[in-house]
Amino acid sequence: MGDAVVAVDPGLQKCGLAVLDGDTVLARAVVTRDDLGAVIRSLKQKFAIAEVVVGNRTGAEGVTAAVRLELPGVPVTLSDEAGTTLEARRLYFAEHPRRGWRRLVPVGLQVPPEPYDDYAAVVVARRRLGRRLAGNLGGASRKEEESP
């Protein structure tokens, strides 16, 4: 297994977490802010974490501080999370096909029956990995915001 990227979709009450190795999702979870440190410690035991990517919106500052406390020396990057909720919703329904009358209603008008912040974290990670790949290939990529 290569180096894993941990992505966090931060929030005030809960956070979505995803661990990816390339395009492979190794783990996903929705955790409370209170449990975030313990979950990160658990992930550190299971995976060789090369980088953590945190969405730059609500709650990003506190989440970044918690990640740095648990993973000293691991680079933490803030990433633009605009539009991740809609992408996460599509990803959720791709993995959980709608049944019955829900098949007739457009995905954009539906909300998953459970929290799907972990899917938003998958989207954040895939965006970051795509940008890293584009940068390695010499393609144009928008520079991510490195947090201090």
Image: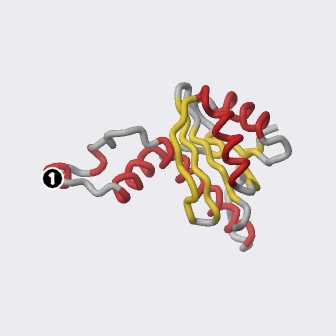
- Residue at the spot 25% in from the left edge and 54% down from the top edge: 98
Q: Quadrant of residue 9?
A: top right
Q: Is residue 108 left or right of residue 31?
A: left
Q: Quadrant of residue 116?
A: top left
State the colouring used for the structure image.
secondary structure
- Secondary structure beneath label 1: helix
Expressed as whole percent of the image width and height from the top left, the position of residue 143 reads 72, 53
Question: Closer to the camera, 55 or 65?
Answer: 65
Mark 1, other Cα within 10 Å: few <14 / some 14–19 / many ≥20 = few
- Residue at the spot 19% in from the left edge and 49% down from the top edge: 102
Q: Residue at the left extreme? A: 101
Q: Quadrant of the N terminus?
A: bottom right
- Residue at the spot 68% in from the left edge and 55% down from the top edge: 5
Expressed as whole percent of the image width and height from the top left, the position of residue 56 reads 63, 38
- Residue at the spot 72% in from the left edge and 66% down from the top edge: 2
Expressed as whole percent of the image width and height from the top left, the position of residue 87 reads 44, 51
Q: Quadrant of the C terminus?
A: top right
Q: Quadrant of residue 139?
A: bottom right
Q: Which residue is mark 1?
A: 100
Question: Closer to the camera, 39 or 80?
Answer: 39
